[in-house]
Amino acid sequence: MCGLSGEIRFDDRRPDVAAVERMTDRLAARGPDGRGIWSQGPVALGHRRLKIIDLFERGAQPMADAEARLTGVFNGCVYNYQELRRELETLGHRFFSTSDTEVVLKAYHQWGVDCVDRFKGMFAFVIVENDTGRVVLGRDRLGIKPLYLSHAPGRLRFASACPRCSRAAASTRPWTRSPCTST
């Protein structure tokens, strides 16, 4: 099940890591097996983990791929992740875990935002390009794994569960479910 949360700043301020920690803590029931927080520049990510595919700490999130210079959080399941992993390995990618989260990161590194066209499953993810600062939010076409957004001046907050995070972030702004669109 898992849960993700985070904040992106657009006003040259640091993200409110304490708010992201509170949002992440409110997702504890969705991921009782682990908790992680990551922040760099204008972005902070939080994750609650339910260990299903990779039971080891190598699969902890937020997951950083030092070689690809990406950091990400993921909720859901890519059913064809093993097939994609084999394809990525033939393209020269090396893996440090057995998680589908790492496959999502490597797929993004290989194919950019078009990686979602290759995913069969239900998912929501956030990937940060560490060198450029670009942040990509994505989810499955049907919205089975939702990704809620809350806009405010200078920032965007996001989470995989709306009511819990709204209260934890002390947000008076409405949270909206991301629309079903594709690029």
Image: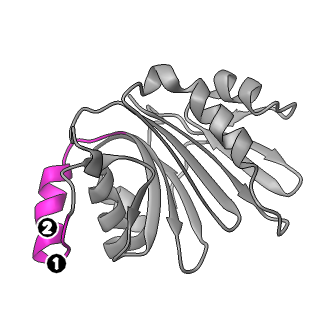
Percent position of residue 1, x then y: 38, 28
Q: Disc 1 versus disc 2: distance between alpha carbons?
A: 6 Å
Tell me which amino acid carries mark 2. Glu
Classify 111 as above or below 63: below
Numbered range of the magenta stretch: 76-95
Q: Give the residue displayed 37% in from the left and 75% down from the top.
A: 68
Percent position of residue 118, x then y: 28, 58
Q: Give the residue displayed 82% in from the left and 33% down from the top.
A: 171
Q: Give the residue displayed 79% in from the left and 54% down from the top.
A: 155
Tell me which amino acid carries mark 1. Leu
Residue wearing tag 2: 87
- Taking 9 as reference, is 36 left or right? left
> Could you say which quadrant of the image residue 167 lies in?
top right
Q: Give the residue displayed 35% in from the left and 46% down from the top.
A: 60
Q: Which mark is residue 91?
A: 1
Q: Taking the image as drawn, is residue 17 in sight? A: yes
Q: How many marks?
A: 2
Identify which residue, 128 or 63, lies in the foreground: 63
Mark 1 packing: few (<14 Cα in 10 Å), some, or many (20+)?
few
Q: Secondary structure at mark 1?
A: loop
> Could you say which quadrant of the image residue 180 lies in?
top right
Q: Taking the image as drawn, is residue 177 in sight? A: no
Q: Report if residue 89 lies within the magenta region.
A: yes
